[in-house]
Amino acid sequence: MALRISPILLVLQYPQPNISAEERAKRLRALTERIRVIRKEQLARRSSETAAMKRWLELLGSPIFQGKGKAMDPSLWVETLGPHYPYHRLKEPFQEWEDSGSTKDFIVWLENEFIPAAINGTFIPKKKRNLYTCWDLIAKDLKQYKAIYLTIEQRKSKEVTIKNGVFYDHTETPFHTGRLSTNHSGRGAAVFVLGQGNKLYAGSHGMGVTGNPNSYFFHSGFLAGARVLAAGEIGVKNGNLRWVSSKSGHYKPGKKEVLYFLQWLQDCN
């Protein structure tokens, strides 16, 4: 184990003979202050990390992360924090919150410190990597747009059932994606998730698709961020399945989820 010696002790025990006592005392005070600042910064970072980890553990213990299936990509978990800001605008602010050493809850910091400062042009990033980021545009989007997370009652209108190989919407009408759309595949496609109990939900994806122009709807919106057994995009014409994909930025389904969904479709005839 390496021997660690305090810089202060070195100054006290081994003074340089050609330095006056007054100069030595001055240097000692400067060194003591520098050590105090470093320790303060370390404590702030530790406090921030503790606050972030505590919040993360609370989320991991919540119902949305329990049960079978694939959880949302870990880098997007901050979207689950109310009032559900769109994840693609949270990445840079979240990094800045971590770098700042703030002990405030992330959402409190975001709404009371970051957004006002960024809009006013007074926000200064902690790292040089973000010097040329358009912070004002990010803040304006965060202030205006929210990600929609459906309630249990709202999600009923997105439920799709399969009977004798035919897809039906919640009104018992043959399901048709011709009037729906996704950001990736465009018109004629829908995003879907297969939730616990093998319940299928599908609908349009993107900005303003729920009727609210100041909202985004993603895969995470169907089950409010909960685990899914499968996720992706789907094309259905008058109740008949045409194609299916595993395209989902939120859940990033793998072979396991794809095979499960295909097997489930086969079981539904």
Image: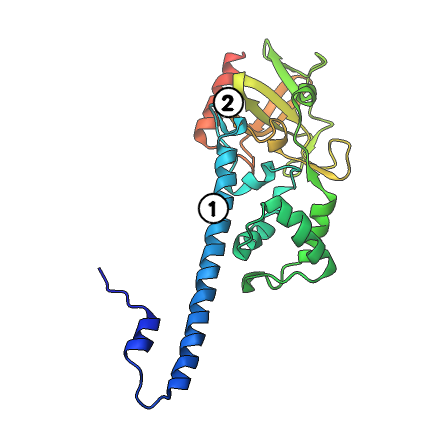
Task: Give SS at disc 1.
Answer: helix
Q: Quadrant of residue 123?
A: bottom right
Which residue is disc 1 drawn over? 50
Q: Position of residue 206 (x, y in %)?
A: 68, 37
Scheme of image coloration: rainbow
Does residue 89 appear in this view?
A: no
In percent of width and height, residue 211 lies at: 77, 32
Gap between marks 2 and 1, in whole Å?
39 Å
Under circle 2, the secondary element is helix
Of 93 and 181, the residue lying toward us: 93
Q: Is residue 143 left or right of residue 62?
A: right
- Which quarter of the figure is the C terminus placed in? top right
Name the N-terminal-most of marks 2 and 1.
1
Give 43 or 119, whichever is nearer the viewer: 43
**Residue at point 59%, 20% (across, down):** 200
Residue pointed to by mark 2 = 261
Asked whether 251 or 92 is in front, the reply is 92
Taking the spot 61% from the left edge, 43% from the top edge, the residue there is: 87
The kind of residue on which mark 2 rests is Phe
**Residue 220 vertical position relative to residue 11 in the rendered view, above or below:** above
Rendering coords of residue 86 (x, y %): 65, 41
Residue 238 screen position, x and y as percent: 69, 18
Instruction: Point out the image quarter for the N terminus.
Output: bottom left
